[in-house]
Each structure stands twice: as C-alpha cells, then as structure tokens.
C-alpha cells in the first residue's frame, strides 16, 4: 500500500543520511538474498506464480531502479536516479526507497547535486480474499516514513503517515483501494512538529490485455493539515500509472503525476514561485525474487 502524501511546497532544512542509507542497503541486500534462497529451495519444481503488480496489497520481494524527471513551477527541473527495494516476510513488507538527483537552474540557492528524499515503509496485510471477483476483499495497514533530502527542491519536511487500506473487487479485472492516513510533519532531525492532518488516496486499478501482465492505475490523492504551523494548508495530486511484464519476473512501470493546490487548482507558475513540484514522470524497471 502506497501512501500518496505529497511533501508540501517550500524548502526546509535537510539532514544527513549517509549512515542511514548504508545500513539500509546492507539490510536490503541481506533480505533479498534470504528471500531468494528460501523461495528457490521451497519450490524448485513449481511454475512461478504470475506477478500482479496492479495490486498494492500483494506481498512480494523485489528491487528496482529508474529515472525520474521533475518540473518545478519556477521552470527549473531535476533529473533523478531512484532505487527501490522491498522485502516480503510472511504477511509483512518492508520497503526502502531513495534517490540521487541533479538540479537544473539557479533561481534558488542550494545544492544542485545530492540525495533526494528517501522513504521507509512497514506494511502489514490482514486476511485478504484474492479469489473474490466482487465485493470487500480485506484490509491492510502501514507506517510510512518520508525523509527530506539534501538537494534543493527535495529538501522539504519529514513526514510520517499511519494508515489503513480496505480493498474491494469491482469485477474480475477492476479493483478499488481506499487508503486513509493520519499524517504528521516535522522539521530537520524531528526537532519540532510542524503539524498534523490526514490524507486520502483512492486507487482504481484495471488489468489490461495490451500485453502480458499489463495494467493501469488511476490514483488521486488529497492531504490537508488540521493543526500546528501548517493548519489549513494542503495539496492534491493526480497520478496515472501504466505497467506490465518485460519478463515473467521483471515489471516496467511508467508513473506520471500532476500536482494541485488544496483547492484542486493548478499551481501558479513563474520565476518567483519557488521550487514547488508541478509535475513529474518516473520510468522504472523492477525485478521480483
């Protein structure tokens, strides 16, 4: 389950991540090795189950890499290399995500090269009826931590989201998920709270016959803060994801996002609007173990 909480506009202080990222990489590689060994020893003579990448509640172990382009409202931009890893353990998943980017433009001071925002998420799946073709299937929960980076334009506040995700089957090919999250925002090193609020991000997914494993996801999101310095502030986003198999264990995904203000209006553009994420596109390839 992915929390679609968008980091608020503005540039805040960043925090160093070198030690954290090193530890994460070690744990991720160890987890992928254990998971791959376990799956190979327990099912050597079995055909692999087809991956359903359209369903965010499926428990998988994977690693991926992709390129992301971000366009800011002041006409500056960022090119970014992002890596993602996910370890599936029983009914749980642990996700790690981080990036390194290069900023184009000098209207705003700050670092033009460096780490972008990173993410760490724990996800727990309760009973889920994947065979049901219509009706309520089950639910899941998550804790999602998003950390500001060092690169300007990616150095906004730190966010923690706690949420639930009920899942529903509409037909054999159409599913809808209704994640709701409580969101908290903090400054650098979590030294002070900036506010708390909520996020809702309904996800509509459809399996397609364009090619093997093809799917599309429509994923709007809305965040509003109700307390603290951010009281009354918010944001929205409209996301479209298109993906499918390159091989039985390799998935390609193209993600496109358009960001809006709290009133669901397009963001003002111009040289003086700062580094506000207007729209972005992300193409990545993921291998499942």
Image (cartoon, grey):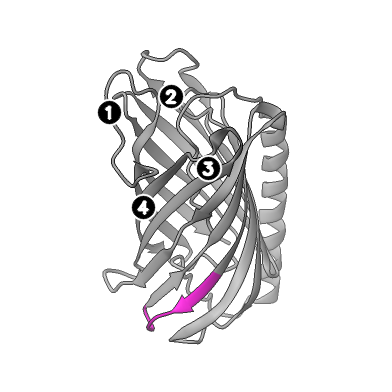
- Give the CA separation, mark 3 to mark 4: 20 Å
Tags 2 and 1 in contact by the CB under 8 Å rule? no
Q: Earlier in the sequence, mark 4 or mark 2?
A: 2
Label 1 neighbour load within 10 Å: few <14, some 14-19, many 20+: some
Residue situated in front as seen by the camera: 66 or 164: 164
Q: Which residue is drawn at 70% across and 71% down?
A: 41
Q: Is residue 57 above or below residue 144?
A: below
Residue labelled with disc 2: 102
Q: Can residue 146 be seen in this view?
A: no
Q: Please indicate whether residue 249 sits to the left or right of residue 142 in the image.
A: left
Q: Which mark is residue 83?
A: 3
- Give the CA separation, mark 4 to mark 2: 23 Å
Magenta region, residue range = 166-173
For discs 3 and 4, the disc positioned in front in the rendered view: 4
Q: Earlier in the sequence, mark 3 or mark 1?
A: 3
Residue 236, how many percent across, how many down?
40, 47
Residue labelled with disc 4: 239
Residue situated in front as seen by the camera: 266 or 207: 266
Q: How many labels does the image show?
A: 4
Q: Tell me, yes or no, whether the highlighted magenta stretch contains residue 208.
A: no
Tags 4 and 2 in contact by the CB under 8 Å rule? no
């Amino acid at each position: 389950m992915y929390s679609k909480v968008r980091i608020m506009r503005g540039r805040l202080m960043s925090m160093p991540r070198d030690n954290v990222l090193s530890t994460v990489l070690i744990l991720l590689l160890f987890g992928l090795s254990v998971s791959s060994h376990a799956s190979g020893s327990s099912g050597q003579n079995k055909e692999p189950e087809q991956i359903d990448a359209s369903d965010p509640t499926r428990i998988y172990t994977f690693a991926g890499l992709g390129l992301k382009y971000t366009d800011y409202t002041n006409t500056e931009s960022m090119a970014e290399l992002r890596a993602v890893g996910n370890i599936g353990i029983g009914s749980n998943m642990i996700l790690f995500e981080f990036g390194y980017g290069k900023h184009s433009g000098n209207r705003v001071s700050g670092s033009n090269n460096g780490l972008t925002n990173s993410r760490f998420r724990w996800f727990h799946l309760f009973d889920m009826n994947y065979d049901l073709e219509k009706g309520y299937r089950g639910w899941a929960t998550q804790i999602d931590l998003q950390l500001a980076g060092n690169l300007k334009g990616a150095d906004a506040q730190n966010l923690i989201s706690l949420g639930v995700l009920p899942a529903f089957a509409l037909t054999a090919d159409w599913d809808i998920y209704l994640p709701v999250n409580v969101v908290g925002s903090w400054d650098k090193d979590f030294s002070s709270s900036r506010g708390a609020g909520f996020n809702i991000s309904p996800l509509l997914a459809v399996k397609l016959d364009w090619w093997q494993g093809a799917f599309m996801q429509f994923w709007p999101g809305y965040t509003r803060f109700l307390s603290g310095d951010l009281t009354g502030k918010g944001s929205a986003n409209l996301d479209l994801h298109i993906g499918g198999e390159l091989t039985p264990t390799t998935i390609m995904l193209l993600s496109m996002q358009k960001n809006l203000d709290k009133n669901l209006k397009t963001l003002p553009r111009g040289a003086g609007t700062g580094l506000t994420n207007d729209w972005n596109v992300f193409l990545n390839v993921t291998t499942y173990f």
